[in-house]
Structures are given as C-alpha cells and as structure tokens.
Image (spheres, rainbow, N blue to C red):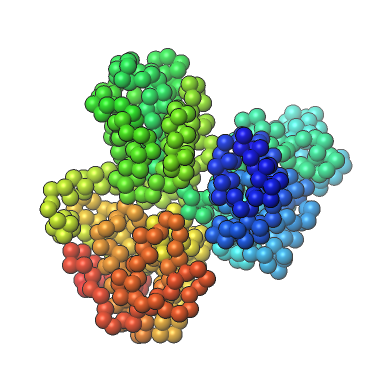
Amino acid sequence: MAADALTALHREGRLAERWPDVPRLLAELTEAERTRAGRVLARLGPEAVLAAHPEVPAPLVAVTGHGTLAGLVPALTAEFARHGLLARVRLSDFDGWVFDLVDPGSALYAAAPAYALCVLDPAVVADDLPSPWRVEDAERVLDEKLALVERAAGVFAEAAPGSTLVLNTLPLPRELTGQLVDRRARARLGVLWREANARLLRLAAERPGVVTVDLDPLLAEGVPARDVRQSVYAKAHLSDPLLAGYAREVGQLARQGAGGGKKVLALDLDHTVWGGVLGEVGPEGIETGGTPRGEAFRRFQRVAAQLGSQGVLLAAVSKNDPEPVLRALSDHPELVLREKDFVRIRAGWEPKHDSLEALARELNVGVDSVVLVDDSSFECGLVRAELPGVAVVQVDEEPALHVERLLAEGWFDVRELTEEDAARPVRYREERARQDFLDGFDSLEGYLRELDVAVTVAPATPEQYARVSQLTLRTNQFNLTTVRLQPAEVRALAEDPTASVLTVSSSDRFGENGLVGAVLLRRSGRTTHIDNFLLSCRVFSRGIETAVLAAVLREAREGGAARVTGAYRGTARNGKVASFYPRAGFAEDGGADGDALAFAHPLDPLPEPPAHIRLTARFDTAPPKGTAP
C-alpha cells in the first residue's frame, strides 16, 4: 500500500531521494491516511528534499493564530506534497497572531512567507468574555477581534504585497449558545456571530491579498468543529479533521499559486455522464432523468454545465462509436449536457490516454491542464501511469457521489473569475472554425494572411490586473520566467514609475480573442528589462509574440534605451520558448540570475513585425492612437 511505501522509504532514508514519487503515493490515500502520512513527511527536513531536488517549489508558510496549531503542520505538509509542493512551515508561538500581523517589524514579516495563515477559533472570543457574560459582551468582543483582524489585513497589504493572508470563519460552538437560557438572546448571539463571519468573508472580497476559508461547508459535511478534551487540556480549539479540511483548502490555493490550475474537464460518458453503455442500450436506453439513478446523473450534468459556464472547457472522451454519441447528445430529451456544451467530442476506440493527448493538442494546452472523470478503474490507472500530469477523478456505480468527487479538489478554482474566463469556451469553439479554415489552405502563410489578425498592445488598466495576475498563475507554456504574481503585485508594478505592465489583446475574422498576453517591463538607466512575457496557448503560432516583441523593442529605442534585456528560466513545461529570444536577435548576456539564462538585444537592427498582423501599440496612459509599424 502507498502508506506503507512512504513509511518504508522514510525508514530506509530514501524519502528525500524519492520525493517526486510522493504525489502519486499520496493520491491513493484517504484524507485520514494523508494526515498520518503527513506526520512521516513532516519529520523529513525540507533541506534534505531541496538538496536532492532543488527544482521542487518550496513556498514558506507562516502559521499563526490563537490556539495550539502543531496538529496543522502534518496536514499542510501532506496537502502541499500532493500537488508537488514542499511546504516549509514556520509555526509561531501560542496566541501570537496579533503581534505577528499587526507589527510590520515582526519575525513573521521578516521571514517573507508566501502564505501567512492566521487560524482563528471560537476561543479567541470566548476567552475574553467576562464571567458572567451577556450577549452585549459577546458583541463587544466580536467587534474588537474583527477590528484587530481588519487592522492586521491592512498592515499585511502594505508589508507583504506579494504574499497571501489566509483567514477563516469561526464555528459557533454549542457551548456558548447553550449558556444562554433566553432563546431570544441565543438567537441574537447567532446573528452577531454570523455577521462577524460575514465581515471576514467580505474582507477577502475587498482585499486581493486576503483569502478567507469558509469552514461552514466542512462543518455541514459532518466534520466536527472541535475535540472537547483537546480544546480544554491542550488549547487545540479546532479538531484534527477540521484542520485537515482547512489544510486541503490551503493546499489547493498553493497549487493554484504555483501554476497548477486546470482548464479542461474531460468526461467519460458511459456510467459517468449517463447510466448504461450506449453501444448496448442505444441512446433511448441510457439513464438520465426519470428514475432516482437517472436524476443523479442529471445532477452531475448540471454541475458540469455550471463549471462550463465559468470558463472550464468541457470535453467528452468516450470509447464509443461517434454517431450514437452525437445522436444522444443532440436528441435525447432528458440530457442536460448537449453537443454545443462541449468544446471537443472525442468518441472512438483508441486508449484513453492517447485520446487525452490528442485532445490537449487540439486545444493547444498542456496535457497537465486536464482533469479526467471516468468510472473505469482500468482506464484511470492507465492514465495515471501514462499521463501523471492529468488529474484523475474516479467515480463508481453510485452516481449520487459523482458531484462530491468532482468538486472535492477544487481543480478549477481561481482567485477571481474574469471576463476572459467566462468567454473561454466560446473562444475555444471558435478555434475549431479557425482550424477548419486552415484546412482549406495549402500554406500556413496564406492562412495567416486571410485570418486577418489584429493585435493591440496597451498599458494594463486596474480592471485588468486580475486577468494579468491570472496569466502569470495559469500560463505555463509561453511563460519565459514563470514568476507568479498576485493582483496586488501587478498593481504595484503598474504604479511603479520605473516599470510597465502591458497587455496584449487580439482578434481575427472569427471574433475577439480577448486579453491573451502580458509583457512586464522595468527601466534602469538606458536599459529596458523584460521581467516576463506571457502568451495564452490559445493564440500560439500566429506571429503575435513576434509582433509584440518588435513593438517593445522599437518603443525602447525611441524612448532612449541602448539595449533591452530579458531572461528565460526553463521548466518542464515551457521548453517551446527556450529559443524565443535568440530567434528575435537577442544574444546570451552575462549576469544570469540563478538558473535563468540572460539575453540582450542591441536595438540595431530592429526586427519587423509579421506582415500579416495589424498592430496597434501604445505605451502610455493617453487615449489610444493607432500605429502600424
């Protein structure tokens, strides 16, 4: 078993050496087993792992709060490791959260964590109530504590703009409500408590650098809020299962911050989207509505459609003949998902992992952007072995549990949903029209000439900061340095007089592609440095990147720069842009930063943008003016 394998590796002293195998082993464990495995992993110092695998992302996580939180460390270690991350956890002293977060000179800020977890519990209020107490006392203490949290969030935004502060809502314990014999007073306490939690949730909506984990959904699933004996004797005021659920949420947040978000939901059909085997029962015989099991499948379809409405790309990947699949999706009266809801439908008899690779190529995304939902243990096992970057969600013969399993890992979560997200499925469906258009040409040059690509380069506006941040977080292929930025960091760059945040938008004869790229610039003397250049995989191979770089170089020279520098930091996923700078006339330059390669362009001669692109470029905040270099 996977748990035994982890323990054996630790005993043999080979766990650090075999760290790349840990995510696969953890994927086979239940949540309770993962927490136990986390205790093994937490005993392994991060230095040993980094010595063996320096490429492993190792975010620093500062944990502070009111109660005893040592039990959170194994859960965090395991949840980060599941996503290929090494959690370096810094645990503060007991009840040190106010000193840690309100003082910008504290040791927490000096450590510069990627994530600061301020773990709140009901005792932060209960411990400050007088004896005896009334509802008015609880109201006063709640207001005082929330004011402290809001003050801490303000200090954090100023002192750590590139970090994320994680808060959580407060469970309301029966121990407090039960002390009030007046039911009206008890109801009043419930109102005050929920208003306090609403303030915590609003804080996350108002401040880009704050995330509030809502514990209510975990409690609603039956997770106990606390273990009374641990709370009384050890001051551990949140239960181990609740801390494990909290750690899962934080792990998902860190995965997203490391560029591990997913874009494509690939659905098997038989026994997954509907009941029955289509090839055996025909479109008329599949289960979807009309019976309890059929309604369970329809419920799953509605949830998949809901995800699709928020930018997730739905694809069908089924071992079936194409004709009955298309007939079922077009004609069955009770199906929620229809042919139009899928950006691709791949029905055939090739191995599932081959079909997923072909799907990724058609959509021009990395195969590690895909989540597969399938009921076949054989297919799931084969995909895990052949395509370890694909997230596999295995369902079974109980369709009522399909939704829970699909949503458990938050694979498609984003910090903020943008207009680009909502428009993504439409734009990928337009991509099929572009592909069909390409098939009618004998040469790529003729296709690009008739595609009529228009590109606009312009400074980012405040409304676009979230989208630019998202590009840094989710773009892995055309991402020259893979530096991930939160919205607050994008804003800081845009407001820095020595820096520029440029957006790249494009359109063609088939419609708008939207904001598809970003260039981050910094000026020092007569040198312009490209901090990063990002481009969505949707618009590869159209010359857009060449046109944008030509505009940046021309603007730099006209602005008095003597040269433009840039860097490339290679990863397992951005190899296709390794030669981007050399092909554009850059030469390798000294001063490489760590594992990055440095390049410089002398600005003579300047490259010309591709002739087939209509380019509009401006580099200040004045009203747009068209230029056609």
Image-based side of 477 in relation to 190, left or right:
left
Q: Is residue 224 above or below residue 591?
A: above
Quarter in which the C terminus is drawn: bottom left
Q: Which of the pair 390/617 is nearer the observer?
A: 390
Q: Nearer the viewer, residue 183 or 585?
A: 585
Seen at 47% across and 34% down, the residue is 381
State the residue at coordinates (57%, 58%): 53
Q: Is residue 559 visible?
A: no
Picture coordinates of residue 573 (x, y %)?
A: 42, 55
Image coordinates for residue 260, horizontal then vertical, percent: 48, 50
Above/below status of 415 relative to 456: above
Query: Residue placed at 31% from the left, 20% from the top?
Result: 279
Q: How many marks?
A: 0
Q: Residue placed at 82% from the left, 36% from the top?
A: 229
Q: Is residue 49 above or below residue 249?
A: below
Give coordinates of residue 303: x percent, y percent. 43, 32
Q: Is residue 575 left or right of residue 164?
A: left
Tell me the quarter of the image containing the N terminus.
top right
Look at the image and tell me whether residue 429 can be seen.
Answer: yes
Most distant residue in the front direction: 12
Among the 4 quarters of the image, the one containing residue 238: top right
Using the image, determine if residue 294 lies above or below residue 198.
Answer: above
Along the line of sight, which residue is nearer the eye, 15 or 573?
A: 15
Rendered image quadrant of residue 241: top right
Give x and y (percent) for residue 108: 69, 62
Q: Nearer the viewer, residue 384 or 518?
A: 384
Q: What is the residue that sits farthest to the right in this orientation?
A: 131
